[in-house]
Image (tube, helix red, strand yellow):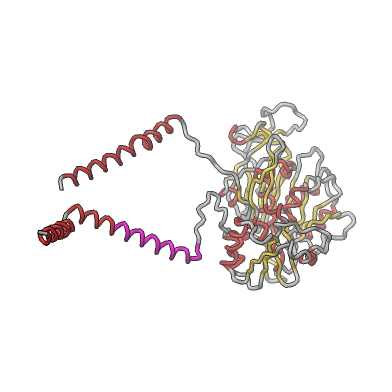
Amino acid sequence: MKKTDKKADKKKIMDSFKDKKFKYGGYATLLTAFVLAILVVVNLVVGQIPYKIDLTENRMFSLSDQTEKLLENLDQEIRIIGLYKAGQENPTFDEILQRYRRINKNISITYIDPVKNPTFANQYTKDGTDLREGSYIVESNDKYKVIDYYDLFNISSDQYGNSYPESLAVEQRVTSAIQYVIADELPTIYTLEGHLEQTLPFQLQQQMELENYEIKPLSLLTEESVPSDATILMVIAPQRDITSEEEEKIREFLNNNGRAMFFMDVVEEEMPNFDSLFKSYGVALNKSLIIEGDRNHYFQSPAWIVPKLETHDIISPMRTNKMQVLTIGAQGIEELDIKKRSIEIKPLLVTSDDAWGKKDLSSEILEKEEGDPQGPFNVAVAIEDNEWNEEENAYDETKLVVVGDAEFLNPQFASIGNADFVLNGLNWLQDEQESISIRPKSLTSSYLTINAFQKLVIAGITVILIPLIILGAGLVMWLRRRHL
């Protein structure tokens, strides 16, 4: 009797393995285990792949094409040293720096604990500056550049005076430092003095120096010529005309592959020598205050113009990043009908067709009056003069950027895009297009804004529709298995 029971139990067990419910359950279990095994293998393989995808909104960890081009052509060793206590390295900065190393193995990244190595920084503080924790040193051979921790951010203030990091400038600073240590010589900008010019704003000067420009004042009343080491001549809002001798010195500089940037204010005083110089390059100052008639192209006041950005190497990265510039009290720049064939003039900033120019600068009426010219006006232009030199058997290339606005450099407008325009213009003047679009990356997070109807639809889908679909699928499966 016992043997019979054992046989019956054994038969029941064997029959249970043949049951359809067991088969389906076994298949499901095997399939789940198989999928989990695949996920584990894929995760292990992906972890060994060095390539990473940057999915952040502002491509925070990605390097620009210009930086990648610089690194691909880099053939000398670059050492990047971070001053951090062990284990306290900034992961965001490190991730960006590791991308430099992945592109070029000549770049090494090390970290030094300033507490454990208190004398290490002495060799980089010969000028008396202090190296704070979080700073970086970029060096090659006998040249180095220190990047202060606070230079890796751009700081802004809110209406209550509270400071906050607005953008991340790691790539901008590191790439600039690499260019500095590998450069044979640095570009030098001379700012003209002696005609009641405006001084270069400190914030902009600081940005220019961070991009490896050396800035020096220049008085052509005392100098025999523009210095031979001048890369760019900058003229900022002169209130008086240059002398004919100064004009000749500037003209001589420009004719010898010279580069210059002019910011010209609207003044009542006649400036025949400046006018003669600009005429040589196919342009003339309109000498009338631009009033914008299109509400979409001015801010607060019709004299505060938000011009259209045209197509040019200086402008393209600004258009890509949806930047704008602001001009106050601008004048138009006319392209002359009669000019040398070698000259090419391209507009950079342009008003709308509804703009007009106030010829009477003392007038208190903004409306257009008789004799006021009608727009559109060029607020800024880029000029190239490629003239064949028979003696040198090559082209003499002169480049100018002319802006018909003195307030353009106002530091209040730097965050809008004015500073980017100036820096892009300087890089274009010295044929450094690869540096034009390396700019800080915004840390501002954008928020999703939805209206009441959209909220209702989303709530209906997530709270009602999706649960009903899941419930219905479960009910169908239950009914099918019940009838098996």
Q: Compared with residue 20, is residue 447 higher up or lower down, i.e. above or below?
A: above
> Is residue 317 at all visible to an observer of this figure?
yes
Residue 36 sits inside the magenta stretch: yes
Q: Magenta residues?
A: 31-51
Relative to the observer, which residue lies in front, 448 or 233?
Answer: 448
Relative to the observer, which residue lies in front, 32 or 208?
Answer: 32
The outermost residue toward the right is 222
Tell me what residue is drawn at x 59 percent, y 67 percent.
101
How many numbered badges does the structure rendering display? 0
Residue 468 sits inside the magenta stretch: no
Question: Residue 261: x and y, percent?
Answer: 73, 52
Q: Quadrant of the N terminus?
A: bottom left
**Picture quarter containing residue 254?**
bottom right
Question: Residue 289: x and y, percent?
Answer: 71, 36
Question: Residue 322: x and y, percent?
Answer: 57, 45
Say whether residue 14 is left or right of residue 348. Answer: left
Taken as a whole, is the magenta stretch helix, strand or loop? helix
Q: Compared with residue 212, is residue 331 higher up or lower down, i.e. above or below?
A: above
